[in-house]
Image: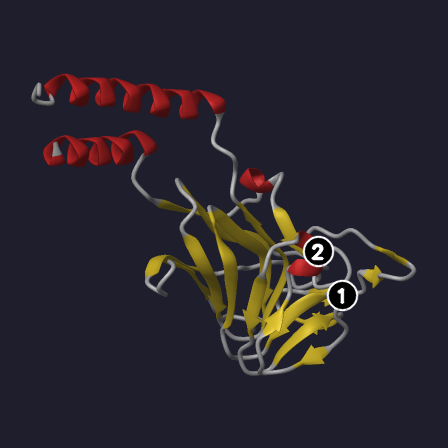
């Protein structure tokens, strides 16, 4: 019977699909995601952990700031990558831009790390960073599991026009199951907005297939049990 139960567990994992992360450079898969806008902050500079998510999303999201992190920034000169800022005052009405609206998060040197109270399946944000002429700085994005183990990471170099305004790139991860407990962005002079995360409900067809397969395996296990 123990062998049968082990077989059932392995089969369930097979039907559910193995965990795998895909790095994404588009917000196409984040249409229904929860978002942290940073509009509730105004120029907060701190090295202490800050809770970001409860007010806007109802989910616990804690930021562990790097050195020189400003929560609720409203203007950044990104050199050859243009400018970020002037997105409108939350009290007077926000100005939509390609990378969000209102305030954002900026970090001059240290990495920024977000921790989630519940596992998420996808996570990402709009990003850009300061760039000098002739240089190609890059960002390192990392997704972490429950115990801090690295699930996936990748580097990306963003280049936008020198006269661009609030331009950038959406970067992140989408996995086959909800096992992301942390997300970090490392790089110099980083601007970040619209931190987005989601844990989609399984599609009815997928859930039905999984339950049906488990039902067949349980029936098979019952038939192989010794008769009393």
Looking at the image, residue 58 sits to the left or right of residue 179; the answer is: right
**The one of 135 and 197 positioned closer to us in this rendering:** 197
Residue at (51% x, 78% y) in the render: 110
Q: Is residue 81 rendered to the left or right of residue 43? A: left
Residue at 7% over, 22% down:
226
As drawn, is 221 to the left or to the right of 207? Answer: left
Say which residue appears at 10% left-offset and 34% top-offset. Answer: 3
Quarter of the image with the C terminus is top left
Question: Mark 1 touching mark 2, by CB under 8 A?
Answer: yes
Location of residue 95 in the rendering, given as x and y in whole percent from the top left corner: 82, 54
Q: Earlier in the sequence, mark 1 or mark 2?
A: 1
Neighbourhood count class around disc 1 (C-alpha, 10 Å): few under 14, some 14–19, many 20 upward? some
Q: Which mark is residue 40?
A: 1
Residue 91 shows in the view: yes
Residue indicated by mark 2: 56
Seen from the viewer's position, the closer of residues 50 and 77 is 50
């Amino acid at each position: 019977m123990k062998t049968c139960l082990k077989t059932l567990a392995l089969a369930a994992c097979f039907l559910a699909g193995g965990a795998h992360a895909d790095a994404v450079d588009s917000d196409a898969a984040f249409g229904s995601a929860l978002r942290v806008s940073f509009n509730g902050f105004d120029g907060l500079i701190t090295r202490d952990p800050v809770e970001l998510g409860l007010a806007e999303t109802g989910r616990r999201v804690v930021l562990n700031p790097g050195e020189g992190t400003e929560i609720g920034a409203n203007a950044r000169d990104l050199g050859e990558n243009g400018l970020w800022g002037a997105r409108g005052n939350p009290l007077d009405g926000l100005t939509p831009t390609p990378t969000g609206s209102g305030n954002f998060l900026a970090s001059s040197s240290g990495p920024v790390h977000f921790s989630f109270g519940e596992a998420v399946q996808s996570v990402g944000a709009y990003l850009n960073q300061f760039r000098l002429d002739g240089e190609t700085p890059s960002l390192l994005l990392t997704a972490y599991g429950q115990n801090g183990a690295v699930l996936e990471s990748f580097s990306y170099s963003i280049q936008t026009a020198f006269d661009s305004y609030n331009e950038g790139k959406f970067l992140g991860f989408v996995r086959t199951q909800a096992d992301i407990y942390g997300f970090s962005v490392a790089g110099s002079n980083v601007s970040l907005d619209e931190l987005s995360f989601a844990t989609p409900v399984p599609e009815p067809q997928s859930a039905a297939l999984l339950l049906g397969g488990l039902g067949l395996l349980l029936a098979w296990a019952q038939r192989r049990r010794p008769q009393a």
